[in-house]
Amino acid sequence: MAAASPRFTVATTGPQDLALLHFTSGTTGTPKGAMHTHEAVLAHQVTAAYALDLHEGDVFWCTADPGWVTGMSYGVIAPLTLGVTTVADSGDFDPRRWYTILAGQRVTVWYTAPTALRMLMRAAPQAAGRTPREEYDLSALRFVASVGEPLNPEAVRWGQEALGLPVHDTWWQTETGAIMIAGFAADPVRPGSMGRPVPGVDAAVLECGDDDRADVTDGHVRVADRPGVRGELALRAGWPSMFRGYLHERRRYEACFADGWYLTGDLVTRDADGWYWFVGRSDDVIKSAGHLIGPFEVESALMEHPAVAEAGVIGRPDAVAGAIVKAFVSLRPEYPADEELRRELLAFARRRLGPAVAPREIAFEPDLPRTRSGKVMRRLLRARELGLPEGDLSMLETTRSGHGGPARGGDQR
């Protein structure tokens, strides 16, 4: 440093010059390096204002690690462009610590992960019969949003009870570079919905083929023109933060587009009001006895039971049905992992989902395998269940606490 020149000339860059390289989480395969340009900062700024409701004078806390796409895009870049005060914390996850930060720093907008919210739900109450908003002064908090994986309805309702605010979902991917679909501050929350496209984003549900991916015929796709159709979510290409390639994988990048649409690989439905509802990744959907079952739907239903802290669902091959639904369940500390509870959970799921969709098997798993951003690795659950190679484990979480573990959240589904 002593030999370094004090003079530095900032390089001249254009909007299409490469600026950021974000890697996907590897929940369903090997991580991919998504390349983004300087133009992406425009989408960061605008979506932070629209989807996160950031205003001048806000105190913003994004709990995502800056090594992840959310931590950099919304923990660093977006708040800097808007000039809001940003909270950064490198301490270990602890419910009391997090509530103390929210209260002590007078946080107004909080952006965190469903995994972190479920861990807060799982934590023992600070005082008998008292909710966090009664135990801590959270009066400054006015908007809570979630990112990183589907937000189960139970977490939305918990936010209303425990924080005095519902949790708004946001949907985007490492590839999209910025929030594409969100529940806005001006809208009442619809628990379980991803929300609606942000202004300037053209989204659609595409009709699928037998492989649960958009049916591309002679280079063309078919947009579902009626509500309730289950299909692949697609975005009209060209928004500023759209990734410009996968590092060293040109063909893989080109395969993500068809007929002017970016094919996300996520299966969704859209209701008559234009709200989107997440079903699952196309490579995660379970085909059982003629039914297409999204793991998220089953996991969300199980987590409505008071004993369940978290769940991961896979399809186990079956000679008759093709696959049966198997759930791996992590319990709250006060509930015993016994056969009586297993039968109760199976019956509970059948009542909530019906026999065709409910899990046929439930296994108790104290520590579900996760990526370091907190998402349950279903592919690893499937590999272990079937005795298959576990594949790339570089993204596997190695600790249950701290910001290297599930509480950091923020990598995209």
Image: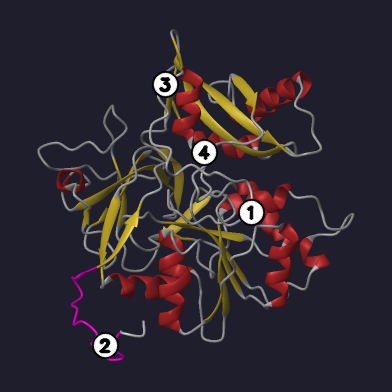
Badge 3 vs badge 4, beta-carbon distance below 8 Å: no
Question: Residue 14 versus residue 145: which sits nearer the camera?
Answer: 14
Q: What secondary structure is marked by label 3?
A: loop
Q: Main secondary structure of the magenta part?
A: loop
Calculate the distance from the C-alpha at mark 2 to the C-alpha at mark 4.
Answer: 50 Å
Residue 17 picture location, percent across and down: 19, 71
Q: Is residue 291 visible?
A: yes
Q: Which mark is residue 155?
A: none
| Mark 1: amino acid | Leu
Looking at the image, tell me whether mark 3 or mark 2 is earlier in sequence order. 2
The answer to whether residue 412 is left or right of residue 338 is left
> Most extreme residue toward the right, as rendered?
128
Helix, strand or loop for disc 2: loop
* Magenta-colored span: 4-18
Between discs 2 and 4, the one toward the N terminus: 2
Q: Which residue is mark 4?
A: 296
Q: Identify the residue under disc 2.
A: 8
Q: Which residue is mark 1?
A: 117
